[in-house]
Structure formats: C-alpha cells, structure tokens
Image: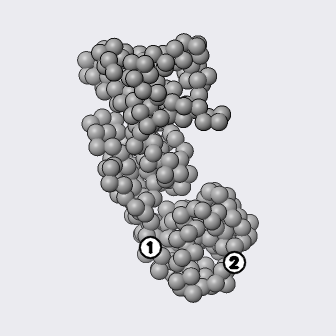
Amino acid sequence: MDGARISSDALSAFAIFADHLNLTRAAAELRISQPALHAKLATLARQVGRPLYNRVGRRLVLTPDGEAVARFARDHDDRLGRFLEELRVTPTTRPIVLAAGHAAYMHVLANVIRTTLAERPGSLRLLHTHRHQMLAAVRTGRAHLGVSALDVLPDDLVVTPVATYPQVLLAPATHRLAGRHSVTLADLGGEELVVPPPSRPFRVNLERAMRAAKAPWRVAVEAEGWPLTIHFVELGVGVTVVSGCVTPAPGLVTVPVTDLPDVTYYAAHRPTMLDDPRVADLLDAIRASAHIKAGVLKKLRA
C-alpha cells in the first residue's frame, strides 16, 4: 500500500459511496459521472492493495477492509473540516449524523432535534435504525452518535445513560386496569396484547416475563413500530406495554408495571467523537432534554 499517494479527494468519494453503497446515488451527491466515481474507487482499491467492496446478488457490500477504509475516510473528513474551521478558511458544513430508532426519535430526541435544526438548519442528518444497525453505524463511523435502549452494553464504544423510564401498560381510559396506580404482570393475565413480531427483543423479553409470572395472554395483533402499536390500542384492538417515555394519546392512559425492569436509553459513540465540540454539545443537549422529560413524567405519576 502506498499511503503517500492516497488523495483526500479519493477518500471523500469513498466515504460518500460507503454511505449509499450505490454508485448512481453516490455519483449524484458528488456531482460527478458514475464512470468517474468508479474510476476513483478502483484507483483507491489499487493504492490500498485490497478489494474495498463486492457485489452480493444485486447489492454492493463493503469488505472488512472497505469498512476500515470508510471509517478512516469519515474520520479524515471530520478532522479536516474541524482543522479548516479552526483556521477560519471555511466553515464546517458536514452535518452531525445521529442514528436512532422510531421510539427514540419520537419520544426521547424530538425536542432536541427540533431545537437544534431551528437554531442551526442543516446541522443534523438522521439515520433511522434498529439498535443493532445503530451500533453498526456508530462503529463504522457512518454515525457520530447513536441513541437506543440497550440490554447489553458494547465494550468497544463509549455509552452514556441518557434517561431511564418505567415500563407501563398503555390502555384505553375505560379499561378495567386504567384507574390503578400500578399493576403487575399477573394483573395482565387473560388480556389481548398488541405486541411486536416474535423476533423483536421486546417481544421476547415480555413473553419470558409473562411466563415467569404465570400470566396467560393472547396476541391481539402483531404490529411493527410504536406508532402503529399505539394506534391499535386507540382502536380498541387490545392493550400493550411500552416505555414510560410515551405520552398517551387522548383517551389512553399509562399505568406503571411494577415487576418489569426499567428501560434505559443510552447514547453511544466511538472514543474520539467528543473531540468534536459539536458532538459533545449535542450529547449534552440530549441528556438535558431527556432528563427533564423523565423528571416531568415522574412528577405527573407521583
């Protein structure tokens, strides 16, 4: 590998390609032709001395070496942007990339995103991910920061607790349990529940807990994502269990489930990410906003 011959332009082009894994879209973002992009990628692969991506069926997939080069390329772009900003040659225009799932975006991060974009339009780019996709995006440098509820904390990333919420029963205000200050899993015996598909970690954990409590239940409907889950509860299809960060829709109430563990949302990033003051400021804002909401919810339920 001849590192002295690798240009910043080639690395930047590969970083954009790695985000899309699609030559057409990457070339359009770079405002060059597809053959020109292909030539840049081929030259970079020759200079590195390793294949950077392969075609698997109809998809393009990075090789392990390609993932390492993409991670380096993104870091290189970030460092170069900050260096130029310090020299006041040009402002940093590359946005901070935040990865999270729909629950975190809707109920934990909404206020921070709204405020950040109002103050600095274009300063955030959002990736919609499941928790495993979030961790992969942070590890590979595709995202600067990720937020998700985590059961197992990764040892290769820095993880910071953002906020902790109880698990709650979400039910119509007319439901037989709606007037309780709290419920147990045994109280849910015989209920029809709106639940995620069987492969989702939340479904697996809930089923285990219900079995341990010897509380029989039935599937009312399987729903992917909290918005649809909550909508089914509004329709009277069944009740559900959600994180306490959810604000009930009109006509619905939440009741803490005392024998389910709390849900903690974490922010995850690579060790060097807080060297960028924009990432550090965003993390501080997320923690402050989430703790405020958690405190308000605690007061309302006291």
Q: Position of residue 214 (x, y in %)?
A: 57, 87
Name the mark on residue 121.
none
Report the residue at 43% width, 59% height from top.
150
Q: Please tell me how crowded label 2 is: few (under 14), some (14-19), or many (20+) other residues with Cα within 10 Å.
A: few
Report the residue at 28% width, 39% height from top.
272
Q: Which residue is mark 1?
A: 261
| Dot placed on the residue nearer the N-terminal end, 2 or 1 | 2
* In this view, 256 is above or below 297: below
What's the residue type where badge 2 is placed? Arg
* In this view, 220 is above or below 68: below
What's the residue type where badge 1 is placed? Pro
Report the residue at 51% width, 30% height from top.
53
* In this view, 273 is above or below 6: below
In-image side of 145 versus 176 (left or right): left
In-image side of 258 versus 27 (left or right): left
Q: Give the camera-side residue of 143 and 204.
A: 204
Q: Position of residue 136 (x, y in %)?
A: 45, 45
In-image side of 158 versus 262 (left or right): left
Q: Give the camera-side residue of 291 and 1.
A: 1
Is there any visible trace of residue 254 in the rendered image? no
What kind of element bears circle 1? loop
Q: Give the camera-side residue of 148 and 114.
A: 148
Q: Position of residue 198 (x, y in %)?
A: 63, 65
Name the mark on residue 218.
2
Dividing the image into 4 quarters, which one contains the N terminus? top left
Dividing the image into 4 quarters, which one contains the C terminus? bottom left
